[in-house]
Amino acid sequence: MGLPGPTHHFGMKAHIGVDADSGLVHSVVGTAANVSDVSQAHALLHGHEEEAFGDAGYIGVDKREEMKGKPVKWHVAAKRGKIKAMQDGPLKDLVTAVERTKAQIRARVEHPFHIVKNLFRHRKVRYKGLAKNTAQLFSLFALANLVIARNRLHSVHGSSPSCV
């Protein structure tokens, strides 16, 4: 016999826009877990980008209605299966090198998630409702920006940070 009352299931995604040079988060969007990444791409741009990088979840972003008229050049990762299916040779080696370069730039997006999930130990949503959880994400990513900025300052000035 189950527990009385309704069973709540809630999953969410945090979509973030990160500056490739500084690693700082400039955009945060919280959505239900079933919302595709590509549908939120327009909300992650601050408007002054010339280039944007995304994983395979952003395939087709440049064809979406929300992107019409935006001068952003998208660099989206190819699906692994497409590269695996290629015949071995110099073309495959070149495509693999290009994809590795894209991945190194996209890796900047993962660092704020590392700070929020591992340093701040935020792994589960705490509240009922998307609005409250998204508000918490804004706070967490703002704090992650402070950690990233502090670490950059420490590295520039030669002293070691006390944590991270």
Image (cartoon, rainbow, N blue to C red):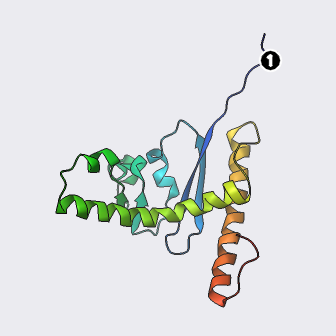
Corner quadrant of residue 52: bottom left
Instruction: Name the residue located 74 percent from the left edge and 44 percent from the top edge.
Output: 132
User: The C terminus lies in which quarter of the figure?
Assistant: bottom right
Which x, y percent locates residue 123?
Answer: 69, 47
- Residue 105 or 134: which is nearer the viewer? 105
Query: Is residue 46 something that shows in the picture?
Result: no
Which x, y percent locates residue 114?
Answer: 63, 59
Instruction: Name the residue located 52 percent from the left edge and 39 percent from the top edge.
Output: 35
Question: Taking 42 as reference, is 90 above or below it?
Answer: below
Which residue in the protein does label 1 denote? Answer: 5
Label 1: state its secondary structure.
loop
Density class for disc 1 (Cα within 10 Å; few <14, some 14-19, many ≥20) is few
User: The N terminus lies in which quarter of the figure?
Assistant: top right
- Looking at the picture, which amino acid does disc 1 mark? Gly
Corner quadrant of residue 162: bottom right
Question: Taking 99 as reference, is 23 above or below it?
Answer: below
Query: Is residue 32 something that shows in the picture?
Result: yes
Q: How many marks?
A: 1
- Residue 38 or 98: which is nearer the viewer? 98
